Amino acid sequence: MDLKKLIHRCVKGDRKAQEKLYRKYSSVLFGLCLKYSRNKMEAEDNLHDSFLTIYDKIDQFKFKGSFEGWLKRITVNTVLQKYRKDQYMNVVTENIKEEEEVEFEYADVPLSTLLQYVQELPAKYRLTFNLFVLDGYTHKEISEMLGTSTGTSKSNLSRAKMILKEKLKKENINIA
């Protein structure tokens, strides 16, 4: 079954089509959820919530642009809304001095180690780090998505990098 037909069947509420859509995209979207979650169980919950939103809003996809990109956007927004609603993120005051930029390369860091350390970050730092470093959003876009200022986004990214750098130093992992 081609993608267009599958989407149309999902719009009509066809359970078998929804199952096919889930099977086709769940692994990609689970990887995305894992980046933004504290652990595997939370990522599974986020994936489930994302698919509920996808099924609910699939009629809004207008076949312009990438369907997978649309799914990813829905997933990220669903996860971010959950964090805002559950108040995992506390907005810090804006009397923040410009923080020194922390730079380092991740080339020699095993992916599983980096993922573990990123998942251990406080929510506001983890979300900002993932959106900026892994997904390429700008600080302006991140601030709009998280309901903060660009200064807070920059500060959260800097702090996330400092925490990661310290964790890697403790493990004697070579960083540039």
Image (cartoon, rainbow, N blue to C red):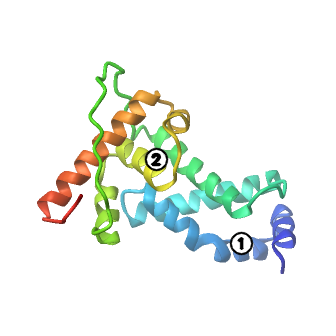
Please provide percent x and percent y for residue 160: 30, 46
* Quadrant location of the C terminus in the rendered image: bottom left
Q: For the residues carrying marks 1 and 2, which lies nearer the camera in this image?
A: 2
Please provide percent x and percent y for residue 129: 40, 48
Within 10 Å of disc 1 (Cα), the crowding (few <14, some 14-19, many 20+) is: some
Three-letter amino acid code at the position of disc 2: Phe
Whether pointer 1 and pointer 2 mark residues with C-beta atoms closer than 8 Å, the reply is no
Q: Residue at x 19, y 56 (%)?
A: 167
Three-letter amino acid code at the position of disc 1: Leu
Q: Which dot marks residue 132?
A: 2
64 up-or-down from 113: above or below: above
Please provide percent x and percent y for residue 72: 62, 58
For residue 56, side relative to residue 63 (left or right): left
For residue 58, side relative to residue 146 (left or right): right
Quarter of the figure with residue 105: bottom left
98 up-or-down from 162: above or below: above
Please provide percent x and percent y for residue 96: 30, 23
* Quadrant location of the N terminus in the rendered image: bottom right
**Residue farthest along the top direction in this orientation:** 95
Q: Which dot marks residue 123?
A: none
Q: CA distance from mark 1 to mark 2?
A: 28 Å
Q: Earlier in the sequence, mark 1 or mark 2?
A: 1
164 up-or-down from 4: above or below: above
Residue tagged 1: 21
